[in-house]
Amino acid sequence: MEQKTEVLAPDAGGIARAAALLAEGGLVAFPTETVYGLGGDARNGTAVAGIFAAKGRPQFNPLIVHVADLAEAERIAVFDAQARALAQAFWPGPLTLVLPLRAEAGISDLVSAGLDTVAIRMPAHPVARALLAAFGGPLAAPSANPSGKVSPTTAAHVVEGLSGKIAAVLDGGACAVGVESTILALDPPRLLRPGGLPLEALEGALGQQVIAPEIAADATHRPNAPGQLSSHYAPGAAVRLGATEKRPGEIWIGFGPNCAGAEITLSATGDLTEAAAQLFGALRAADSLAQAAGAATIAVAPVPETGLGRAINDRLRRAAAPRG
Ligand code: TXA
Ligand code: MG
């Protein structure tokens, strides 16, 4: 259904308008510290179905529920001592916990895709927190991009992908973290998706090792996390990873000081926090340059597999994966 997508300022008026649209079952994209989310009332099956439709997302891929505080989270999911300790250590922030869903939580079955667990997080962005407080309930929110495409880190990215398909976007500027939240299942701790909270921080808080994600060889398997779909974050051009130089006909995304000739850099100094914040914007910019120049390939310099580098490399591997 085509609709006019309102662009709302992140002030009291914009937040009140966004909350009213959500209360009517409308879809509103909003900034989080990781990426923009496409929010809908997690208790309203029609709204949640609308999220899947707007994104063109397969319904077997469940959504993250966003909450205002730990008390709301505990009404939806069962927290044991370890889950509560992690929430207290890292919320609000870029950590999503996959926990047993309470039958009486009132969350639409579509949110969890029929699983008996729910993915839940408390975002840190002040606009997200103000929106959750004004709305007064849980918001289901996947990243606000068409399914399989690069996640949005500005309101303009959201408009580019979803204009006409959603009621509004709250414009809170660029996202500070720039990659999606880290997704963790418990009993025992398992990393389902590397993200904005580094694995090292999680393992430090847990005092134990976290089991690494298994990348399903068969992309048709029902995914545990989006990571298990082989192609994701796909720009139009092909992607070549580990590129220590630029080849003819390529657009080169650099990282660190040894990338003279790169059109774009994730971080000239090799800073992983800066690189994560730049990543999705860089992929979009490189894609535009590739299109304009008739270049078939985006080459990306190597990024170390530590801290936020794990999340960056995960997204880059999916951007480079064969398209389905
Ligand atoms: O940073 C983020 O996490 C952003 C912002 C908007 O909060 N959201 C986000 O949502 O990245 P999305 O839908 O693009 O990725 C969430 C993933 C889903 O694709 C799904 O595979 C996984 O979380 N997930 C959701 N519920 C799950 C569950 N019960 N068990 C395992 N994985 C689950
Ligand atoms: Mg996504």
Image: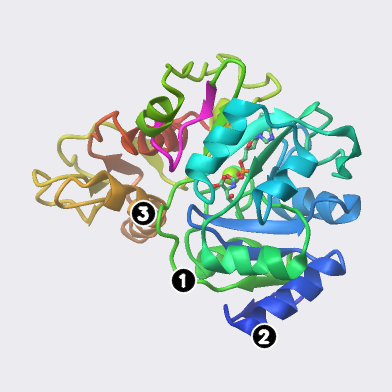
Q: Amino acid at mark 2?
A: Gly
Q: Nearer the viewer, residue 194 or 89?
A: 89
Q: Is mark 1 within 8 Å of ligand 1?
A: no
> In whole angstroms, how far apart are the C-alphas of marks 3 and 1?
12 Å
Q: Secondary structure at mark 1?
A: loop
Q: Residues within 10 Å of mark 2 (few under 14, many from 20)?
A: few
The location of residue 96, given as percent across then percent down, is 58, 39
Q: Provide the residue designation for mark 2.
A: 13
Q: Secondary structure at mark 3?
A: helix
**Quadrant housing the C terminus:** top right
Q: Does residue 278 appear to the left or right of 131 in the view shown?
A: left
Where, by quadrant of the figure, is residue 199 drawn? top left
> In whole angstroms, how far apart are the C-alphas of marks 1 and 2?
17 Å
Q: Amino acid at mark 3?
A: Ala
Query: Which of disc 1 and disc 3 is earlier in sequence?
Result: 1
Q: Quadrant of ligand 1?
A: top right
From which residue to which does the magenta span run?
190-199
